[in-house]
Image (cartoon, coloured by chain):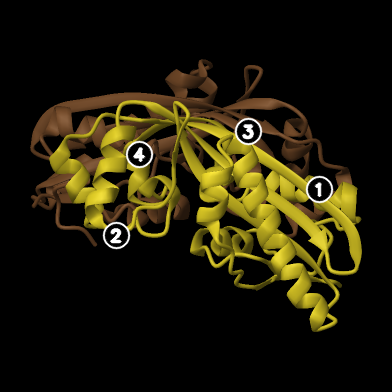
Chain colours: A brown, B yellow
């Protein structure tokens, strides 16, 4: 079987692929995300371009090593009424992000790109899930921040963990909120790359 | 802090409470579920009555031991156009359940009951999430069954694991699909029992 390469170091993406029994290796990409963020203002376009850039970065490096592989790349952001929200860099920023999201609904958007090292085909797609938060007090938000779940996560929360206590509702794919719309990965691999994730040798 | 007792042996409920950082102990109840299933035909009423029966079973046993504790009990079923679907007992039954659910939407309903050993108050509630499945082939369903995720789970699937590949959409609480509507647990404990899950000593 062809190797599957996840062009991401996100612990959430790694966990969800593992839990789905999919054998893969990770590849860390090095993209100047800020350059994209200043140039592209449309949210869906931005995450798609970032996912594509990560996939192509990985593809070029892996081709240099003559590796035959399928590459999956993704990028996730939060869109609150058109405002793009990424990851927090420190606790105060995490607080400000969470304060804004409380008692409201936002969009969690993941751009994905799937390609193969030895195939010119590149599939770019995205998935959007509406996420609704309860209203927490400032004190409760600070208590949440102490869990450190805000680190390295778009929107500064982790739906699988303590944030489950304040996520009242989602509408869309739940794996997408974790950072990989798994049903789309399954469909694209099957239809576009002839790889059925139910028929692989599972881990 | 008062002990929290989860009146359930579900590995999914145990995992989601742990991941939310909540310290708790489990207590295994012994309820004749079939008796309820033949008597109660309304789905929401059924899961509520089952959750209540589990909570009261645990409450009586724990009171005998003079333990001061908050008890959380739950029961989950799948409702497909009014047909009540529980857990499969063998692979063929799991196949038949999954075959029925593919390409359609169903309701995942969890009844919950929260009470305290030394408090007559009993709160009974439920939460419903709409879950949409892609259409899988019979061969893919059999491949899924080999993962053993169907065991001990209402509807014979696990959204956190390989089933993420065929769950295209949900509408409602995602923790509810795992077996515990965490936002409702948080709200009920805070409003009805004065326990704030953000302010406890976390695990």
| First-in-chain label (1 vs 2) | 2
Q: Nearer the viewer, residue B40 or B29?
A: B40
Q: Residue furthest bottom?
A: B65
Q: Is there CB contact under 8 Å for labels 1 and 4? A: no
Asked if A117 appears above or below B104 in the picture, the reply is below
Quadrant showing the C terminus of chain A: bottom left
- Residue A100 vs residue A192: left or right? right
Q: Which mark lies nearer to you, 2 or 4?
A: 2
Mark 1 to mark 4: distance in Å? 33 Å
Picture quadrant of residue B120: bottom right
The residue beneath circle 3 is A169
- Residue B106 vs residue B49: left or right? left
The residue beneath circle 2 is B148
Mark 1 to mark 2: distance in Å? 34 Å
Label 3 crowd bin: few (<14), some (14–19), many (20+), radius 10 Å: many
| SS category of the residue bearing label 1 | helix
Indicate the chain on which mark 3 is placed.
A
The residue beneath circle 1 is B188
Indicate the chain on which mark 2 is placed.
B
Indicate the chain on which mark 4 is placed.
A
The residue beneath circle 4 is A182
């Amino acid at each position: 079987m062809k190797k599957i390469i996840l062009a991401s170091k996100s612990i959430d993406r790694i966990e969800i692929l593992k839990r789905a029994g999919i054998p893969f290796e990770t590849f860390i990409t090095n993209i100047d995300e800020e350059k994209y963020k200043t140039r592209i203002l449309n949210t869906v376009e931005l995450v798609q371009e970032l996912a594509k850039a990560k996939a192509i970065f990985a593809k070029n490096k892996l081709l240099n090593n003559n590796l035959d592989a399928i590459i999956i790349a993704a990028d996730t952001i939060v869109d609150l009424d058109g405002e793009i929200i990424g990851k927090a860099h420190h606790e105060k920023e995490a607080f400000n992000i969470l304060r804004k999201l409380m008692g409201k609904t936002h969009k969690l958007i993941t751009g994905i790109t799937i390609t193969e090292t030895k195939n010119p085909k590149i599939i770019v797609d995205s998935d959007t899930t509406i996420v609704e938060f309860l209203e927490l007090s400032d004190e409760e938000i600070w208590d949440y921040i102490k869990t450190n779940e805000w680190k390295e996560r778009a929107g500064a929360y982790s739906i699988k963990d303590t944030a489950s206590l304040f996520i009242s509702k989602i509408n869309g794919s739940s794996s997408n909120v974790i950072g990989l719309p798994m049903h789309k990965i399954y469909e694209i691999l099957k239809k576009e790359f002839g790889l059925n994730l139910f028929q692989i040798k599972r881990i």
